[in-house]
Amino acid sequence: MKRKRNGFADFNGKKTKVYAEMDIQSGEMVYVSDVEGNIIKVKKLK
């Protein structure tokens, strides 16, 4: 069973609710990997 990883990301000063498929710590850089309806999926920027 997958653990839900909902949180918020700051995109140019706008706080946006996001979903991550991996653990991401506060302050790490992310990018939008997919958008499904109103769900914004993010991944860690390597």
Image (tube, helix red, strand yellow):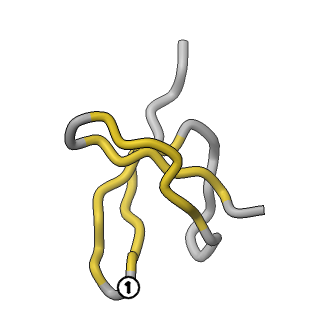
- Specify the quadrant that holds the N terminus: top right
Q: Quickly name the residue at label 1.
A: 12
Q: Which quarter of the figure has residue 24?
A: bottom right
Residue at 62% in and 62% down: 25
Q: Is residue 29 left or right of residue 12?
A: right
Q: Is residue 20 left or right of residue 22?
A: left
Q: Position of residue 43 (x, y in %)?
A: 60, 51
Q: Quadrant of residue 21?
A: top right
Between residue 17 and residue 33, name the one nearer to us: 33
**Amino acid type shown at disc 1:** Asn
Left or right side of 13 for 5: right
**Which x, y percent locates residue 23?**
63, 47
Q: Position of residue 28 (x, y in %)?
A: 64, 70
How many numbered marks have been drawn onto this rendered protein structure?
Answer: 1
**Residue that appears at 55% across and 61% down:** 31
1 relative to 41, above or below: above
The extreme left residue here reads: 38
Furthest residue in direction right, as rendered: 46
Q: Secondary structure at mark 1?
A: loop
View extreme (bottom): residue: 13
Seen in the picture, residue 2 relative to 11 is either above or below; the reply is above
In the rendered image, which quarter is residue 2 located in? top right
What is the crowding at mark 1: few (fewer than 14 residues within 10 Å), some, or many (at least 20)? Answer: few
Residue at 38%, 85% (x, y): give it: 12
Q: Is residue 13 above or below residue 32?
A: below
User: Which quarter of the figure is the C terminus placed in?
Assistant: bottom right
Q: Is residue 24 above or below residue 16?
A: above
Residue at 21% x, 43% y is 38
